[in-house]
Amino acid sequence: MENVEQFIDQIINEKGYTSLDADVRAQLKADLTQRLLDQIDTAAIYALPEEKAVELSQKLDDPNFGDEQVTEFMAQSGVDLQDVALKTMLQFRALYIGQDKVNAANAAAVAA
Amino acid sequence: MSEGLKNNAEQGGANLDPGVAELQNIPFGGAKQETVKALPEVPQGKRRLDISEFTSTDANGNVRYDNAKLFSTKAFEDLLRERAADTASSDGKLAAQMVSQMDRPDYGHDRMVARAKFVMEGDPNFPTAEAEVDRAPLDKLKSELIRRVKAGEAFEDVQQEAPVKKPVAEMPSIDVPSSEGDVETGAEDAESAELPKDWFDNADFVQQLLSMNKKALHKKYGFNAGRRSVEELLARRSGERGLGILKRDEVKSRKIQDAYSAYVASITSASEEIREVIEKDIEGGATEEGKFDENFDTIRDALKDDTGRYSEPLPTPIAKTANADRAEFDEHFDTIRDALKDDTGMYREPLVSFVSEAADRSASKTEGGAGSVEVDNNTSESKEAEFSREGAYKELEELGADISMFRLNKMSDTELRDYLEKTKAGSATESSEDNAEGTATKVEPETSLRERLKSLAGKIAESLPGRLLRRGAGFVKGLIERIRNGRKAEEDADALDEQAQTDELVAKIAAAEEKPSVSSATVAPATEVPTVDATKPEVLVADTPVAKVPEVPVVPVAKVPEIKTSVVEAPKAEKPAAGSAETETTKKYKLDDLVVRRADGSFTYDNSKIFSTDEFLKILQERAADTASSDGKLAAQMLQIMKIDNAGSGDDFGAYGRKRMVDRAEFVMNSNGAMREVDKDALSKLRSEFVAKYVESNANDVLTSGDREALSGAADSIERAV
């Protein structure tokens, strides 16, 4: 999967919204995308120990603290951002389309 | 995020968070220009701004954006007005709110700046109020302003001048024009741009405006205000605060004036026809029992226009429904008759009062006679019609729709029915596909999806630092506070749970020993403990720290863009009917339990205590339905805050969300940093409503400002009841 849009498209279809008007779908996609990224960012902070989160909040005020420094800080704090993002995306999907559907799909895959 | 993308983010993507657009592969501002274009000439009276004008250096020598400076600019004000029209987006909605604050005739601009600064930076005195719900959209607006400044756009003056406190103009009263409908709008006169607030006290005119969406408003009256603007306007129509939005725009004001004139003319015209019917009845001695009801066919025709279509003065939703299937509606005209009556069965507006009085006199004679049977039948029909609408809501809810949107959007019956059918069709397709193909063919198993998502998750992780930097320290601090509060709530819950278990054990021992059991009533507050209901679809039942995440929208809301997303339906606590047993046993607090007394006997309210009560929550739930009022809107927002913050707990109004709500309410009432918080007046009303309803009055109390607020709240309640 190349980008978030494809992921969001997939879960909208899995949800069953396959015949939405184009503008409605666009709005829904934008909302969901924003919400997903909010959740991933939140999850990343929650993954930090509290004292590290406090430290990060202080560092974010520093204009010299850039992308690389944040990445390094998170890595040194033991947070695997890719893993956080992946888990959150899967949870987000399960929440959106329904855990039952996901369970059924998983069970069917195992049975197959 | 790469430097190139970061630059792009600063140069475009007005409606999307740069991170979002980046991940959606939406280019910011198109391809990078190879050649440098000359900036357009700066018009007279304007100038380009230097971004350095909006930065400041802190004690450590760090350069930061100065929010107060940024938000004080004319450029920001212009941006807000521009974005306020886009009511479908979160930043547009926020902009509309801020514009309405700004347009208050007194310290509106100051208030807007203070509020925006608070949203971005929080208040050190109220750290738990820091995670403002409006932060993300305001961030977008701020980013857009910075982008424009950096792009070299020319703006008017940089800093706003100190706001001038203008005296509130006295609103002229309005006389209902004569039957000729020759209404003098005075539209050419600039002063007449000030709209008499009386107009907006006309419930039917207001209803008509609110029942129309932006397109319809434009088509009928030619202005682009949109229902949202009308709602904002109406919500602030009390006193000098009303009309700010449109008053400043003479053109729009004229349109409103014309709209009202047309409305009055149509009522007057219809009323004349109805008057003729009545007079004819009187002349013919036909005023006996039930005659007015029997002659309703004639009145029905008076409610139609020249083309035979239903029109004003019927409220637009009813007229729409009527015209959708006119023949059937004609046959069921009793429904319309009921629509013209109030809950007590008396005729009311839009029948003008003299007609109403005559009709009521006639209708009242039918009490106990055959007519009353007819009225009962009609009431049943009316209830049935209402039930079908409720049924539609229920079905939509079962299909996963957020029905609060439909309730609030005042969809016509036809629109609602169409939407329901469309939704059903989609659901049926899905269901039949499920049956035919099995769920597994539609939903990808997690194992394969996980593999496919890995690289995308890596990309998102790569861009996460950039997003965190944009969100800033406030975002992280807010989350830290949430973690701490959540932990405390859990500890409190554990303590209560332990206490409950201990009590239960003691009670069992007591019972075993055949001694009087120890009452566990003392641990009644255990109901405060959030319970997990995994069946609720909007709740993220998580086993990782991601638990406290906002709910996910499950229904496209773009169809109803005028509706504020922060408004939630709050039907759980039904307002008890007047005179019911529940009302009679309403819990009453003693005033002294909710106030802090001064030496002289006067007092101030203990906001923390008041906002923590179950009864205050009830007030919020009751008032949230009244979306036309400022306190109703605030109540809905507060419920939304509670709901969001309880995501993951399985309880919409559990302990954590309530604490958050109480903190927020306390902040609004007590904060010094943004003392003129726009929500303060609305919250005062809610508190007053609580006091009026749930606090025992004490005539010996010294009259304080708090008392006056309570009295004011009681007056509001009475006004609403009337």
Image: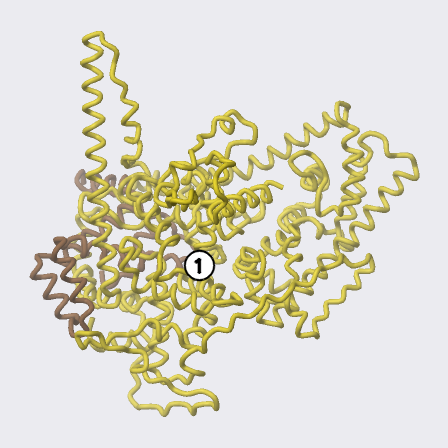
- How many marks do you count on the picture? 1
Residue B131 versus residue B607: which sits nearer the camera?
A: B607
Say which residue appears at 53% left-offset and 51% top-offset.
Answer: B628
Residue at 22%, 60% in the rendered image: A1
Which residue: 49% across, 64% down? B100
- Asked whether B335 or B645 is in front, the reply is B645
Tell me the colour scheme of the image.
by chain
Residue underneath mark 1: B678
Compared with B456, B549 (above or below) is: above
Question: Where, by quadrant of the figure, is residue A81 drawn?
Answer: bottom left
Circle 1: element type: loop
Q: Residue placed farthest to the front in the image?
A: B600
Is residue B668 among the parts visible in the rendering? yes
Say left or right for B368 vs B510.
Answer: right
Q: Does any portion of residue B624 appear in the rendered image?
A: no
- The brown one among the chains is A
Q: Quadrant of the N terminus of chain B?
A: bottom left
Asked whether, in this view, residue B231 is left or right of residue B324, the answer is left
Determine the colour of chain B. Answer: yellow
How far across and down, in percent of the image, does residue B415 sit? 55, 49
Viewport quadrant of the C terminus of chain B: top right
Which percent across, then down, holds residue B373? 72, 25
At a point 37% along the width and 45% down the height, the residue shown is B607
Q: Residue furthest top?
A: B514
The subunit letter for the residue under badge 1 reads B
Q: Percent x, y for residue B449?
A: 20, 52
**Against B581, is B408 above or below?**
below
The location of residue B711, given as percent across then percent down, is 53, 44
Is residue A79 placed above or below A98 in the rendered structure?
below
Please give left or right for residue B333 compared with residue B417 in the image.
Answer: right
Classify 10 Å Cα crowding around label 1: few (below 14), some (14-19), many (20 and above): some
Name the residue type under label 1.
Answer: Val
